Amino acid sequence: MKFIHVFACVLLFLCIGNPFAAVSMQAQVLRNPNVEQKIDSLIANMTFDEKAGQLSQYSGGFNDNATDNPAKSHYEELIREGKVGSLLNVHGVKTTHDLQRIAVEGSRLKIPLLFGLDVIHGYKTIFPIPLAEASSWNPGMVERDERIAAREASADGVNWTFAPMVDIARDPRWGRITEGSGEDPYLGSVMAAARVRGFQGANFDSAVSILACAKHFAAYGAAEGGRDYNTVDISERTLREIYLPPFHAAVRAGAGTLMSSFNEIAGVPSSANHHLLTDILRGEWGFNGFVVSDWTAINELHVHGIAANDAESASLALNAGVDMAMEGGLYQEYLPALVKEGKIPETVVNEAVRRVLREKFRLGLFDDPYRFGSRAREKLETLSAPFLASARDAARQSIVLLKNDNNILPLKKTIKTLAVIGPLASDARDPLGSWSALGDTSNVVTALQGIQRAVSKETKILYARGCDIVGSSKDGFSEAIAVAKKSDAVILFAGEASSMSGEAASRSSLDLPGIQGELVKAVVAVGKPVVLVLMNGRPLSISWEAEHVPAIVETWFLGVQTGNAIADVLFGNYNPAGKLPVTFPRAVGQVPIYYNHKNTGRPGNDTVHYTSRYIDLPSSPLFPFGYGLSYTKFEYGNLRLSAEEISPTDSLTVSVDVNNAGTRDGEEVAQLYIRDEYGSVTRPVEELKGFKKIFLKAGATKTVSFTLTPESLSMLNIKMEKVVEPGTFKVFVGTNSVDVKEASFKVVER
Ligand code: BGC
């Protein structure tokens, strides 16, 4: 019989080597008695209308450049009456200060406003989409970029971002996969914490930190069929093991707010889910920030079929733990009456108001309501040279080299004639990706521009668009074929429009859209060396391309420095090191396909009939999780463990030697996975538990060490208790989730 060792969660979280241990617990230490007293006296003085006001957020849609918006005077009036706690989609130094003035001088209680906006991957300096940045496996870089986003946004009056989006996505049909860090809870958690730290900084002493909002709580990415807003029906185990960890990491990193998601989970919409918003978030995790609903998500409780009318929707949401209503206005309309009728306890309302006020205090808005919004900073910093240099660095690190037969890449800068073909080659809009805040096409370096800048003066570039991103016209094919024929090599750009991923942009096909697949075939048929450069917001099914095109480069959407970063990689100024944060399927029918799946009783075996597989496709993916090539070659050897046996409370060190066996310097992401072989419940065939990005000079060797802590080895047993169970663990270390060295050790009860 197995002895099961149960840990107190608190102890586990303090374990050395836990990637989250270094994270400050800001949310937990913020209960400053002085602030709480001030909040007490404010609440004691508030009418129910004013309380409802603090819990209401509206979308203004105006800024310094468009002040004639007729909605503005309506909101000004509401602010004066104390009926607005926050506005979203409002920015600009003058606009935000004017409105703030009304709140702190014209309203009875003088409570400042929060100004929220979706600053997802940059404000004006647009960085790669989050899925791309996750491909860097570099949390330090991600933190830096969010810091920059916070600086630019705060200079323009914004003090709250609806980011990071930390939804795990195992289904690339879901368009919002583009906004997150991919399929893995560990990588997702590391990135979630980094983004929160980036937005919020170490503290809120300076006005360059903005409030983060981890969204969409929770399991939004598990929508059936990958269709946005669709039903989610997952087990409590999958919820806790796969979908919740990045939220927990964000909370531990001090995220001030969370956003409740649109979807239901097993019959309960998130915005009415007491178990999620109160039992887990507040009860288990000790979160003391506030929860904002997603856009009209409270109103939609009625449509879900869980509330008979709007008043019931408001009551369900507030009682469940949604503190602020984004749009929809239901709290303002119904809350006072619901309290009078006894449907919402006054204590629940007061607690929600307290949480909102606490974050306003935390941002320093009561000390200086105008601290955000600075023309001087805006001028000095926005799109400044160091920010653009960071954007270029981030874009290069986000690129994943998928194929490079015969080392066709990097190309020589002195190449004589180069064809640049494809609908995305000279495109300035799509590289900004979805949710590009105040990103402007005029600041985008297109791929064609980047290439033109990088090659020698003698190089002749022949550009042909070939076809549109969507549509079926082949009118441009002959020109594309003609320029390919005249060239020494072809760089072919293909992929998606940015509007094909993001919210409400799910796809039923993962193929290259429109006629692009045929363009690729026609250009490859010319017989010149072809480099296929992909721009897309999700994994694509590119099986034909992977077989027939000699070099493939995944660039996702890279932001304002797209062209420079792509040229850096194509011409060898930068040696690519990105690794896929999500599995690439061979065909859409394989979806969902992810590396940390269960074994089943009949694991897929392509040569055995009665196994878990498709009869018309290999079981393996096209490109596995963690995959990505370099212009050099890394070899792993001498995998060793610090012990053959450990007790459930021990940690273990895993070391491996990584050698750069090629001729170029380069970076490598060494990845550590484990498998808990036999448990009281089944465990995934592999789970990522650590990674390190290292730089190695050509020929050099480095020892990379990881620590496996009790936290890394723990699982939820049948009673959903976090435990380390005795037994054998396999350890895998390597360059991706498939190409690994293997060892094993035992956990024994001593
Ligand atoms: C999206 C959120 C976003 C909000 C505000 C909603 O439609 O789901 O992610 O933060 O709009 O723009």
Image: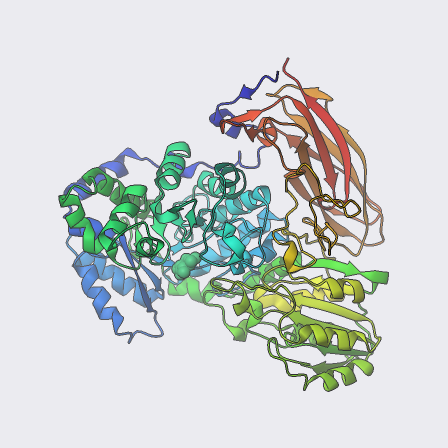
Tell me where residue 233 appears, x and y as whole percent: 47, 46
Image region (quadrant) for ligand 1: bottom left
Q: Residue furthest top?
A: 750
363 sits to left or right of 451:
left
**Taking 363 as reference, is 86 above or below it?**
below
The number of callouts visible is 0
Tell me where residue 411 appears, x and y as whole percent: 80, 68
Q: Residue at x 73, y 73 (%)?
A: 520
| Quadrant in which the N terminus appears | top right
- In the image, 374 versus 360, the foreground residue is 360
Task: Give the image's coloring scheme.
Answer: rainbow
Tell me where residue 397 appears, x and y as whole percent: 65, 56
| Quadrant in which the C terminus appears | top right
Q: Residue at x 65, y 54 (%)?
A: 590
**Taking 191 as reference, is 453 above or below it?**
below
- In the image, 670 versus 522, the foreground residue is 522
703 sits to left or right of 674:
right
**Taking 706 as reference, is 697 above or below it?**
below
Q: Residue at x 62, y 54 (%)?
A: 591
Tell me where residue 298 appears, x and y as whole percent: 31, 53
